[in-house]
Image (cartoon, grey):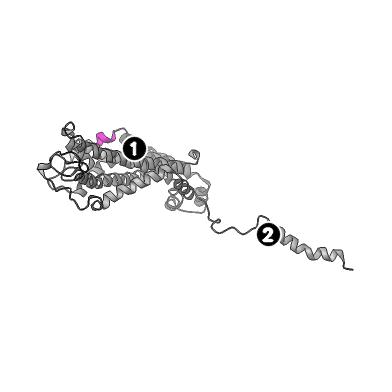
Amino acid sequence: MSDPNASMAAAAPETVEKETYLGSELPPAPGKDRSRSLWSDAWRELRSSKIFIISAVLIVFFLIMTFFPQLMTFGKSPTTCDLTLSRQAPSSEAWFGYDNNGCDVYTRTIYGAKASILVGVFATLFTMFLGGFIGVIAGFFGGWVDSILSRVTDIFFAIPLLLGGILVLTSFPSGEDTNLYTEVAKVVLALGILGWTSMTRIMRSSVIQVRNADFVQAARALGAKNSRIIKQHVVPNSLAPLIVLATISLGGYIGAEATLSFLGLGLQPPVISWGTMINDAQPYIRVAPFMLFFPALFLSIAVLSFIMLGDAVREALDPKLR
């Protein structure tokens, strides 16, 4: 007869192995071992957001208009005009009609996206880098550095953006030789001189919350220099609010450029933008309202698309709003 104890001992390893295999020590499934972070969670949230998808499609559409306008105008030039077609209504030959000089409104609307989008993008980047840098310095070092930079920021913040832009543009008018990039640079500078204050305040608040975190204190205890702490620890963990504000501000800068151009102070002819087209169409709004309607419609959709993108990014980066 066989010994029962020997049989139990022989079966024990198999039982232990089976329990271990069925327990929590199972090997992770492929693709499940990736570490999660704020940005990965935000991207996962954005992909499931209808607002983000709609805004992204619209923004891609406007980017195609900006960099490849000839694809949407079928080879037509915005400077090809015929006075005999002046202010003719929309038709199959001219979808948006003709302006006062007999130019195709559709073609000029497509080409006008470039100047408006470029102003919005570069003004946002300018204010983001300048305001973000000042905010990081003020928030990280604190003390008298924070006091001085905060008071300077408050002084600039008290001046309205459009009023400051008007003052700058009237003080430095355009010369005789104007081209797209010099005009864009002029308007970007006028908007950026006062637009950085909001970026500074939001970045300063974010840095103040991060600078006393445990990982920052640990890096400081290990002897890391301030520059290294700022670059590798503070800035990456403080960027989320700044990115949200920059995304929303981009649409605001596009609208600000259109406002300045409508007043005759922003982009100047022969540069084509939605603001200059609205300015040119304003005297003929009663007899040819389509001259103003279509560029104003594209302007509104562009501004709305960036605001929608900013709202989607804000909801994705803020766990409290999910």
Tell me residue 84's x, y (percent): 9, 42
Q: Quadrant of the N terminus?
A: bottom right
Disc 2 packing (10 Å; few <14; some 14–19; many ≥20) = few
Element class at badge 1: helix
User: Is 159 within the magenta?
Assistant: yes
Residue at which label 2 appears: 21
Disc 1 packing (10 Å; few <14; some 14–19; many ≥20) = many
Residue type at the position of mark 1 = Thr
Q: Would you say the residues marked 1 and 2 are in contact, meaning their CB atoms lie under 8 Å apart?
A: no
Q: Is residue 53 left or right of residue 274?
A: right
Q: Is residue 85 left or right of residue 202?
A: left
- Report the disc number at residue 279: none
First to last magenta residue range: 158-164
Q: Nearer the viewer, mark 1 or mark 2?
A: 2
Q: Is residue 127 left or right of residue 91?
A: right
Residue type at the position of mark 2 = Tyr
- The Cα atoms of the two marked residues, 1 and 2, are separated by 62 Å
Tell me residue 97's x, y (percent): 19, 41
**Who is closer to the viewer here, 242 or 56?**
56
The residue positioned farthest toward the right in the image shown: 1
The answer to whether residue 298 is above or below residue 74 is: above
Tell me residue 256's x, y (percent): 27, 38
Q: Residue at x 40, y 42 (%)?
A: 244
Q: Residue at x 36, y 43 (%)?
A: 247
Residue at which label 1 appears: 153
Residue 167 visible in image: no
Residue 19 visible in image: yes
